Amino acid sequence: MEDIFVARVMSTDLQTVTPETLVEDAGRVMLERNVGSVIVVDEENQLKGILTTTDFVNIVAESHPKAETSVSRYMSTDVVTASAQDGIRDAADLMIEHGFHHLPVVDEDEGVIGMVTTTDLASYLSRVKSPSPKS
């Protein structure tokens, strides 16, 4: 199978928040939009971090008052990213290597432009027709 670019499989309907967003509000966005993460961006759409459902386990475990806690306290800031021109095999390798389910796609000028998730990759693979094994 030829390598496909990240741009072909990434989601572009992103749910974003700012570092100052309260975790309660970020959680509400994730529930209402049925997504497993929100991208944390500044006013210029530049990536600042990511907050995932896994991060909410830490929030609950530490029992901080959610209404008083901003996203910046729990977001991951050492975010591994991909570009739209990267191959999906490389993106998948990064996700497996780091144990990620979400991989933000960034552009040097535009900032965050998409997200590749394990669901995106599985959806793509389910549509690919592969040849039948030879008997």
Image (cartoon, rainbow, N blue to C red):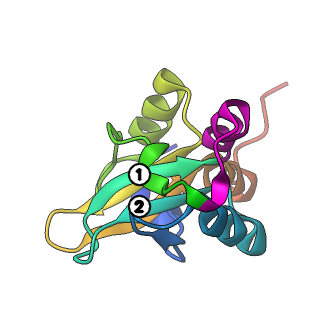
Q: Residues within 10 Å of mark 2 (few under 14, many from 20)?
A: many
Quadrant that contains the C terminus = top right
- Which residue in the protein does label 2 denote? 40
Front position among marks 2 and 1: 1
Q: Amino acid at mark 2?
A: Val
Q: Which residues are magenta?
A: 53-67
**127 vs 83, nearest the viewer:** 83
Q: Is residue 40 above or below residue 65?
A: below
Q: Amino acid at mark 1?
A: Ser
Based on the picture, tell me whether residue 20 belongs to the magenta stretch: no
Work out whether residue 84 can be spotted.
no
- Which residue in the protein does label 1 denote? 72
Q: Tag 2's secondary structure?
A: strand
Q: Return the x and y of residue 97 as percentages of the image width and height.
A: 47, 22
Q: Which numbered tag is attached to residue 14?
A: none
Question: Quadrant of the rendered structure where residue 56 is?
Answer: top right
**54 vs 4, nearest the viewer:** 54
Question: Quadrant of the rendered structure where residue 79 is?
Answer: top left
Dot 2 or dot 1, earlier in sequence: 2
The residues tagged by marks 2 and 1 sit, at their Cα atoms, a distance apart of 8 Å
**Is the stretch drawn in magenta largely helix, strand or loop?**
helix
Name which residue lies at 70% across and 48% down: 122
**104 vs 27, nearest the viewer:** 27
**90 vs 40, nearest the viewer:** 40
Marks 2/1 in contact by CB < 8 Å: the verdict is yes
Q: Return the x and y of residue 133 as percentages of the image width and height.
A: 78, 31
Work out whether residue 48 can be spotted.
yes
Q: Return the x and y of residue 131 as percentages of the image width and height.
A: 71, 43
